[in-house]
Image (cartoon, coloured by chain):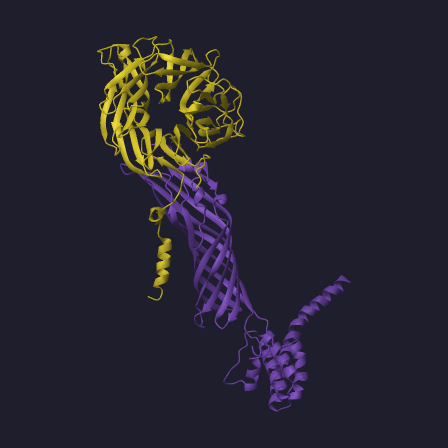
Amino acid sequence: MRYAWLILVIASLAACQDAHDARPMERITFARFYESSLGQRAVAAREFDGGYLLLGSRLTADDTTALVIRTGIRGEVLWRSELPGIIPKSLLIGSNSLFVSGDSIHVNPESPNVNDLIIQSALLYRVSFSGTPLGKLVIADHSPSNRIDYKADALTLSSQGDIVMLGTFREPNVNATERPFVAALNPNTFDTLWSKQYNVIDRDYVNARTVHYTADGYIVWASAILKEQQTFERTYLSIPFIRETSVFENNDVFGATTDQKLLVGDIQRASDPEFGYGVVGTHAAPSGDNANLFFARVTSTGNFIAGSERYFDGTLSAANVPVAALESASSDDGAALCATSDGGFVLAGTMSTTPQRGNGGRDIFLVKVNGMGEILWNKVWGGTGDEAIGSITETSDGGLLLCGSRDASGLPSMFLIKTNANGEIQD
Amino acid sequence: MRKSIAFFALLLVALGGPIAAYSQTACALTLRTARATYDEGRLHELPHLLAPCLKSGFTKQEAVEAYKLLVLSYIYLEEPTKADEAMLQLLRTDPYFEINESADAAEFIALYRTFRTWPVYRVGAKVGVNAAQPHVISYVDAVEGAEVSYSPAISFMSGLVFEIPIAERFALNPELYFQIRSFIYESNLNVGDNQTNSSEGKEVQTSISLPVSVQYTLSKSKLNPYVSAGVSVDYLLKSSITMNRLRVNANSIQERTFDVTSSRERIQINALASAGIKARLGSGFVVTELRLAYGLMGMNDPSSAFTIDDYLLFDSGYADNSMRLNSLSLTVGYIYNVFHPKKLKPGK
């Protein structure tokens, strides 16, 4: 018994210690990865009721399932909901439920009609705040054959609280292009209140991930207008600006008279709506070479502000300098952006690692610009594999919330990162 | 000429041994004569009689006895200064000399007690092993649902040891160690079907440690058991994490070592509690000691939990919990007594 204390000391040291026996660390930032034995990719994240909502997808060989994850303040899972058969694209927080939109792909390998081999339809799920699926809307062509494909790209709420869905449709024709539609839906019954299809020009519309409904009743979004020519893609940007059920009241374009591949990732309102919008995307040569992260400003009425365009290269902009349009060392893309309360924007994309910068594969590339588009700071994060950005938003405490996926070893998993206002996972 | 030098060298070797043996035998005879002289009371003859052999010829034991006779002689001749000088020479010859309370003269014992007869310090070296175990103060999760645990790993340490007796049974014990401390990090995530994504890492910290403790000898015996308590200040030289990652349905991530020194506090302060034994061997002690070092400070900055290294975070899902580091060490060593006998000032 004399040496019982010694035995106790040795035993306590020799034993494993579970970190969760301690208390959780008080922090304002975190990084959290959500893994499984299957690939998962995050699409969108939003601050919600003292925690966060994360929308992602789980990929299998024959199906895709949307994952809606409600987390606490440190990103810890509080509940998880699965929505089958949807490739999710957009997450909307309504007044009494959540909405998830995306695409459903149905394969008909036995169909004699080439137009019906793969049929795409738009899906909208309504989910309670506790994660229970409450309803589902399928926007599809129910014709027996030669069906029209529908895709749902983005959701927002109108001033009346109705759901406004932006999507595209493609008619069953080899030469048909993918064109936008906007539909307003009752948030409780999913009844269609109105819808409008746009056949403005004979080119593919590739919509950004966000659609806005302004205080004065306008709907605005951003699209890349694309025309593939053999292996080249020549695209330019347009900002459709409509009233409910109206034709385009404005449709300003950028790059229509020059040759380039210009894709749009996102469009977001400035912190003061009077200052219009910021647009982020990817600018490259028509061959896809010399890709840079692209940023431009748009007025509140949907006009590109001449001279506001900026190009950033993950390597050459390391010292907080913009580059010329095709001046590029790394292959960059712009996926999402958010307005910050100081009047600026944070642009989020990825860059390919170069000998000068990066950690291998594609890394996260963040650029903070002020309201004039002047770069304030930039950061590169990542591991040996490929990282991708789903969304970025500013949180109520002035921090940044990013989601996306990392693919370190051939299996993607989702991440949710909360940073401080300077984009650091510090404190 | 060369032949002459070789001849003299051989002569010296041949005669050197017998001359020394003769000298020792002669001095043994001198000591016997000195004892008789002392017994006959002719005390004033002793210094002259012993002087040549004290200079050279006595064995250590004979020299001690000779000095003892001199001390006694000077005491009785009432020459205190010379008695002190003889006692000092006795203690320098044999620092471990101890009085025999029942046989030695009271005056001799009294004089002996006016001298510093204990070692002024001990010096030595220790080597050993330690097992370090982090204590998590607060945790962060980088991988949702993963169970993170730490376990000790065995590492090496060695250092210099000093002991300064400060009172009966008490000694101040400053040391200087080069130490390696390491521990294992494990993160396991059950992804279903009894399959697990896992990360396993080993953190190795190399540091210089300066422990200072107060040692109390529990009993003066063959093993001299003792306990001690104190603090140590460690200066971290380097810290690295070697991480290995395995994921279900995915390629493993190549094992890599990351330098995490900049994410660790360079200075660490630990509370120490030790228990050990000191077994007498030669002019010192063989020491075996078990020591617990209890980290009093966090070993890392919690604000940087996610920013140690991008690869660690994105490839391995590693984030730094806020931790203190404790360790248990077992060392063996040898400490050598260093004496500086001197006359104590009155009152000491």
Give the farthest residue toward the bottom: B40
The C terminus of chain A appears in which quarter of the rendering? top left
In this view of the protein, can residue B248 be seen by the observer?
no
The N terminus of chain A appears in which quarter of the rendering? bottom left
Image location (x, y in percent) of residue B83:
63, 82
Query: Can you tell which quarter of the image residue A189 is in?
Result: top left
B117 over A176 or under it: above or below: below
A198 over B28 or under it: above or below: above
What colour is chain B? purple
Give B57 or A153, whichever is nearer the viewer: A153
Query: Can you tell which quarter of the image residue B35 is in?
Result: bottom right
Residue in view at x 47 percent, y 59 percent: B231
What colour is chain A? yellow
B113 on left or right of A240:
right
Residue in view at x 37 percent, y 19 percent: A220
In this view of the protein, can residue B46 be seen by the observer?
yes
Image location (x, y in percent) of residue A155:
32, 23
Image location (x, y in percent) of residue A316:
53, 26
Give A345 or B230, whichever is nearer the viewer: A345
